[in-house]
C-alpha cells in the first residue's frame, strides 16, 4: 500500500478527515485520508502518494507532484 498513488475525492487538511481512492486488487477502494505533512491541505482531484497505511482503511498521503 505504501508508495501507491491515489486521487483525492474528499479534501484532506487540518481538522478534516479526507478521502482518497486507491487502486487495490484490480479495482479502486476508498480510504480515510490524513495529510502526511502537518498543516498541509490537499484539494479534491489531486493525485497523491500513500506515505503510511494504518489498517484497515486509513492512509497518510502527500501530493504526488509537489
Image (tube, rainbow, N blue to C red):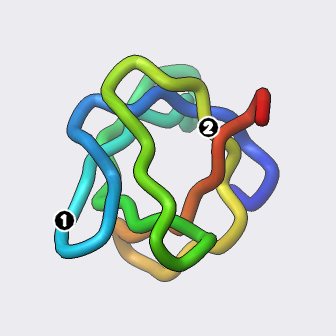
Q: On the rendered image, what quadrant is the C terminus found in?
A: top right
- Is 30 on the left-hand or right-hand side of 55? left
- Is 53 on the left-hand or right-hand side of 43? right
The residue to which callout 1 is attached is: 16
Q: Residue 46: where, in percent of width, then height?
A: 50, 24
The structure residue drawn at horizontal position 33% and vertical position 60%, both measured from the top left corner, is: 13
The tag on residue 60 is none
Q: Earlier in the sequence, mark 1 or mark 2?
A: 1
Q: Residue 36: where, in percent of width, then height?
A: 60, 70
The structure residue drawn at horizontal position 75% and vertical position 60%, both measured from the top left corner, is: 2
Q: Residue 52: where, in percent of width, then height?
A: 65, 73
Element type at marker 1? loop
**Mark 2, other Cα within 10 Å: few <14 / some 14–19 / many ≥20:** many
**Mark 1, other Cα within 10 Å: few <14 / some 14–19 / many ≥20:** few
> In front of the other: label 1 or label 2?
1
Front one among 29 and 48: 48
Element type at marker 2? strand
- Total labels: the figure holds 2
The structure residue drawn at horizontal position 61% and vertical position 72%, both measured from the top left corner, is: 37
Q: CA distance from mark 1 to mark 2?
A: 16 Å
Vertical order, 11 against 50 (above or below): above
The structure residue drawn at horizontal position 66% and vertical position 54%, both measured from the top left corner, is: 50
Q: Quadrant of residue 9?
A: top left
Q: On the rendered image, what quadrant is the N terminus found in?
A: bottom right
Q: Quadrant of residue 34?
A: bottom left
Q: Are discs 1 and 2 less than 8 Å apart at CB?
A: no
Q: Residue 65: where, in percent of width, then height?
A: 78, 28
- Is 36 on the left-hand or right-hand side of 65? left
The residue to which callout 2 is attached is: 48
Vertical order, 20 against 46 (above or below): below
Amino acid at each position: 500500500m505504501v508508495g501507491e498513488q491515489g486521487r483525492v475525492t474528499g479534501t484532506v487538511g487540518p481538522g478534516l478527515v479526507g478521502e482518497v481512492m486507491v487502486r487495490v486488487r484490480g479495482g479502486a477502494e476508498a480510504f480515510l485520508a490524513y495529510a502526511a505533512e502537518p498543516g498541509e491541505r490537499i484539494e479534491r482531484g489531486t493525485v497523491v502518494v500513500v506515505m503510511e497505511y494504518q489498517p484497515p482503511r486509513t492512509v497518510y498521503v502527500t501530493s504526488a507532484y509537489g
